[in-house]
């Protein structure tokens, strides 16, 4: 290749890499050129507007902005010539004059002032700006003080080009030019989603995180004393971040350049951390008071002492483990069950399932994956022999067609969504399939807003077109799949014309989408709970797998199957064996060879029968078969379907131990509550949706007498008669690498050094295989299996009494059952009350308006909450987030299970909605 560019930089010959600017070459070679409007960070385009980086180029009269100027062969550049330095100093002097003097600066240590120091400018000869705009403190998380704004437009690029939220823009011209939110709204009233990217980008302190400010003075109050690199505890994206710490508290959080986030964060990752400092944190073990009934759960989490008494660790652990041991010894291990956590580390998840399997003597161990992607994993293991993603979500950048089905990533995987939006800006076509019109709609080439629960009808129609019109990849089908003929024969009647009335999408559109997906150079599918949480969730995923397999849209860059995993560590917890039918690495408990392997490793005989799943465990409690439970880091009294039934089960238990950060709805039924460590208080690994194993580091100690989850697990094991003595998580990780071939070549030391390694990793220096299955699948035959699916109606269809469809899910600001985010001030300020989203038409029909109260009733129960008008919601549908304890959506949901994944139908129930009281129209 002839793209070598040799030129002269400060009289030395240097070489530019392809595409490098002069600034980048100089910086790479260790030279310093000031820069303000240029962020040398992934995703940021150089703009060259501030002129702080000017250099002299021989033969040119004007100086050049080095961040946008590219070298040409033989060019002679001088970065430190007198004229370049003079011009740069002048730029800083002018800018310094245009904002509060350093003594009054909002951030006296901003990038601007640090560069000003380096170029030797401390104040300005120029008069201060007369009419600086006043402060805007309307947003709960961020302060806007445009008197320090230098119009560098970094925040505009952050908002429009990096996170693609399109809120910040420039308005007016010339001297009056200024940044605005939407149509010059106060930030707090704009459509800002509070990702904070603009705050992280701003070089002057014009945008600042309120958490670190003295608001009255309008300035940063404190610099962090120390910083700790870790990973975000919220979703499965796995953003790397830095905690900024002062006085034993998290002052603020900054995004780091991790492989899944490239410095980006969302509102929860950036502004949602103060839950760890909330006064409701449990700081002492609690024991239920003598004689207090478990039907008596009207307990204020601020004051548990009405129903519980405090106890020392020794007593609490003796009671906690002793109660479980007594049940085991009296009724056998299968009278016990455990729910582990996808919010903790891999090491904790591994120890939890080992404790249940070897200490309780049962496989009754499960976790929230059952309510989440259990159906996806069932279909993936059946179809392609592996339950994890075949490609990371970053693969979207190499795709020509991106399909997002039953997933709302702008709210639930917001940082992943930014990369989808980036890909669309680069020319990829986005197809969104969702009954609700969600935020990605704006970026979509096709928005298929189809009938809820009719995924199989929609997807079978696509398969029908692909097979009938011979759009499939016959070579790939012959080489890498089996049972094609069965699928072909099965799919024949599912023509787009036949499916149109079922799924509500015109046949012609179904044909276009089928052609688009099949014929593109590279198509990739992302899916979420809208697909998995149905009694036919496994069938839905079988169709997605079939789409990818018949078209060969898998195993190459820009192709694949990606179930967007939910919890920060649900991939890792599942890999570690927190599943009733599988040991670590998905080895079936009923497989004698697998059992022998783990019996040998753990030096204990193991139960050969598969255990019960989450919802089955609740039923088994009612049936008197399960009497004791250990629940760590899950809140089933809010997250299970038909939650009154689940709460009733919890109240029936002879013995319940709950290990959490707060007195959750679940902990209210406990005999013993063990106060545990939040993610920023522990060190451990977590595995994100991309199969990236990442290291989280402890930033702070747990409060009061709360303890590390790992320590508590050790003590509980000892109480059950196991001789555990795991000290540091690295010891557990070392055992895991012996138990789990998927972790081959990944060591603790490597993670400490590299921060993130993708599995499978083929050698100690292989960063990991991001795209898998380019030449076959880890199935018995090496082929992917095509499994046909029939259209099965939802378990409960609307009727005269319950004429509407209830679907449940999430909001950007809140996490699941709200335990953490409703105790994070910014998040709670942004979404403070329980809401039901209805179409404007239905609201009118109900005689209510936005802000009015509605009662939503299903065959399970009834809740009252505030109505919100949403144009994205089709008439006949009501959407309710399940995070509000005062109006718990799961009082309403249907617990009917998918027969394969055992996942309940959270996304479909027949419901009735009525207005109550006056609407505030
Ligand atoms: N802010 C926030 N982020 C989260 C979480 C959180 O609690 N809060 N939780 C995390 C977890 S554990 C998970 S699993 C993920 C979940 O992330 P998502 O899968 O995005 O979550 P949901 O909001 O439950 O549902 C997704 C979409 O399914 C659509 N849908 C409803 N019914 C149907 C249907 O019949 N068919 C189809 N195709 N779509 C339908 C809904 O309209 C919704 O847009 O989010 C993770 N991220
Ligand atoms: N209606 C409806 N219900 C649903 C869903 C839906 O879409 N609709 N989605 C389902 C899905 S996908 C999921 S994943 C589940 C989630 O259901 P859950 O896992 O039950 O929900 P979370 O609120 O995430 O519960 C996590 C708990 O762990 C605690 N915790 C956090 N960090 C730690 C830690 O480090 N140590 C310990 N010991 N505790 C910790 C928190 O305080 C909280 O109580 O909900 C399911 N339920
Ligand atoms: Mo989930």
Image (tube, grey):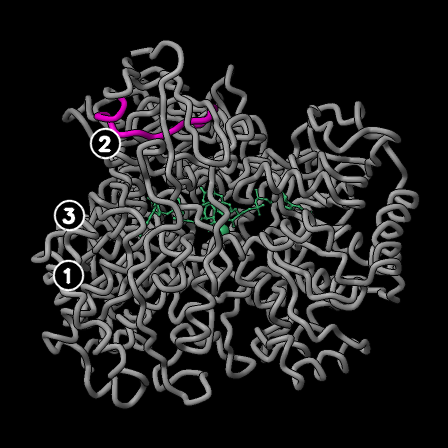
For this view, does 51 lie left or right of residue 445?
right
Magenta segment: does it hold 833?
yes
Q: Which residue is mark 3?
A: 62
Q: Which residues are magenta?
A: 831-843
Residue 47 belongs to magenta span = no
Q: What residue is disc 2 on?
A: 871
Question: Is 325 positioned to the left or the right of 403 in the image?
Answer: right
* Closer mark to the observer between disc 3 and disc 1: 1
In this rendering, the label closer to the viewer, 2 or 3: 2
Tell me the tag on residue 513: 1
Label 3: element kind = loop
Q: Is residue 910 visible?
A: yes
Rounded to the nearest whole Å, what is the CA distance between mark 2 and mark 1? 24 Å
Which residue sits at x=19%, y=81%? Answer: 473
Which quadrant of the structure image shows residue 813?
top left
Q: Position of residue 608 (x, y in %)?
A: 70, 75
**Residue at horizontal 49%, vertical 43%?**
269
């Amino acid at each position: 290749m002839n793209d070598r560019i040799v030129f002269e930089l400060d009289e030395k010959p240097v070489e530019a890499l392809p595409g490098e600017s002069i600034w980048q070459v100089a910086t790479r070679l260790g030279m310093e050129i000031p820069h303000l409007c240029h962020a040398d960070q992934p995703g940021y385009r150089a703009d060259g507007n501030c002129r702080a980086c000017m250099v002299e180029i021989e033969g040119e009269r004007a100086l050049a902005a080095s961040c946008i100027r590219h070298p040409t062969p033989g060019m002679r550049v001088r970065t430190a010539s007198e004229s370049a330095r003079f011009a740069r100093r002048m730029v800083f002097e002018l800018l310094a004059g245009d904002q509060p003097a350093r003594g009054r600066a909002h951030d006296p240590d901003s990038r601007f002032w640090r560069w000003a120091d380096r170029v030797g400018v401390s104040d300005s000869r120029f008069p201060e700006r007369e009419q600086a705009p006043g402060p805007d403190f309307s947003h709960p998380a961020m302060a806007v003080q445009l008197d320090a704004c230098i119009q560098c437009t970094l925040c505009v690029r952050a908002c429009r080009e990096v996170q693609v939220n399109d809120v910040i823009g420039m308005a007016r011209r010339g001297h009056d030019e200024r940044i605005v939110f939407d149509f010059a709204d106060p930030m707090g009233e704009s459509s800002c989603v509070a990702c904070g990217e603009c705050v992280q980008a701003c070089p002057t302190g014009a945008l600042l995180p309120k958490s670190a400010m003295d608001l009255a003075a309008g300035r940063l109050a404190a610099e962090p004393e120390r910083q700790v690199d870790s990973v975000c505890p919220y979703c499965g994206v796995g953003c790397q971040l830095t905690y900024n710490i002062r006085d034993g508290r998290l002052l603020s959080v900054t995004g780091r350049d991790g492989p899944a986030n490239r410095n980006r964060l969302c509102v929860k990752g950036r502004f949602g951390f103060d839950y760890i400092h909330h006064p409701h944190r449990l700081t002492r073990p609690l024991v239920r008071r003598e004689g207090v009934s478990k039907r008596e759960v009207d307990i204020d989490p601020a004051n548990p002492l009405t129903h519980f008494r405090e106890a020392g660790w020794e007593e609490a652990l003796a009671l906690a483990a002793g109660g479980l041991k007594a049940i085991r010894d009296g009724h056998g291990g299968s009278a016990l069950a455990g729910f582990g956590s996808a919010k903790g580390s891999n090491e904790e998840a591994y120890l939890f399932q080992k404790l249940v399997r070897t200490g309780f003597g049962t496989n009754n161990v499960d976790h929230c994956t059952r309510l989440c992607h259990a159906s996806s994993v069932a279909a993936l293991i059946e179809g392609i022999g592996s339950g994890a993603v075949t490609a990371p979500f970053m693969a979207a950048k190499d795709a020509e067609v991106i399909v997002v089905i039953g997933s709302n990533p702008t709210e639930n995987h917001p940082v992943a969504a930014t990369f989808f939006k980036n890909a669309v800006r680069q020319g990829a076509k986005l197809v969104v399939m969702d009954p609700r019109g969600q935020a990605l709609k704006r970026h979509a080439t096709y928005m298929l807003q189809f009938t809820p629960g009719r995924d199989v009808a929609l997807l079978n129609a696509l398969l029908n077109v692909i097979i009938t019109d011979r759009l499939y990849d016959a070579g790939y089908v012959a080489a890498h799949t089996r049972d094609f003929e069965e699928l072909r024969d099965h799919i024949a009647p599912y023509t787009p014309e036949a499916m149109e009335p079922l799924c509500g999408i015109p046949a012609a559109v179904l044909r276009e989408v089928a052609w688009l997906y099949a014929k593109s150079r590279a198509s990739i599918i992302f899916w979420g709970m809208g697909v998995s949480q149905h009694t036919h969730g496994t069938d839905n995923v079988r169709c997605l797998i079939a789409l990818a397999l018949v078209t060969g849209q898998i195993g190459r860059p820009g192709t694949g199957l990606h179930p967007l995993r939910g919890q920060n560590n649900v991939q890792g917890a599942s890999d570690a064996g927190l599943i009733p039918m599988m040991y670590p690495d998905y080895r079936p408990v009923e497989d004698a060879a697998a059992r022998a392997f783990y019996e040998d490793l753990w030096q204990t005989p193991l139960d050969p029968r598969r255990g019960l799943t989450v919802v089955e465990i609740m039923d088994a409690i009612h049936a008197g078969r399960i009497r004791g439970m250990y629940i760590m880091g899950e809140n089933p009294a809010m997250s299970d379907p038909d939650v009154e039934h689940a709460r009733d089960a919890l109240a029936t238990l002879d013995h319940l131990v709950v290990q959490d950060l707060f007195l959750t709805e679940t902990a209210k039924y406990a005999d013993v509550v063990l106060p545990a460590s939040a993610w920023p208080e522990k060190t451990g690994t977590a595995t994100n949706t991309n199969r990236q194993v990442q290291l989280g580091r402890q930033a702070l100690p747990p409060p009061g007498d709360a303890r590390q989850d790992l320590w508590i697990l050790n003590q509980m094991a000892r109480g059950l008669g196991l001789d555990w003595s795991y000290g540091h998580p690295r010891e557990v990780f070392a055992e895991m690498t012996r138990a789990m071939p998927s972790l081959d070549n990944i060591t603790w030391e490597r993670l400490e050094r590299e921060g993130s390694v993708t599995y499978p990793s083929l050698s100690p220096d292989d960063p990991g295989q991001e795209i898998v299955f380019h030449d076959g699948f880890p199935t018995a035959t090496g082929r992917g299996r095509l499994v046909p699916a029939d259209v099965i109606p939802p378990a409960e269809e609307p009727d005269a009494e319950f004429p509407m469809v209830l679907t449940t899910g999430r909001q950007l600001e809140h996490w699941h059952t709200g335990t953490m985010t409703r105790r994070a001030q910014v998040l709670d300020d942004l979404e403070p009350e329980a809401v039901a989203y209805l179409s404007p038409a239905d609201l009118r029909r109900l005689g209510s308006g936005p802000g009015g109260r509605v009662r939503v009733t299903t065959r399970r129960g009834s809740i009252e909450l505030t109505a919100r008008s949403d144009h994205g919601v089709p008439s006949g549908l009501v959407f309710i987030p399940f995070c509000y304890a005062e109006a718990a959506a799961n009082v309403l949901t249907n617990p009917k299970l998918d027969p394969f994944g055992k996942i309940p139908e959270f996304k479909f129930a027949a419901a009735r909605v009525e207005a109550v009281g006056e609407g505030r129209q």
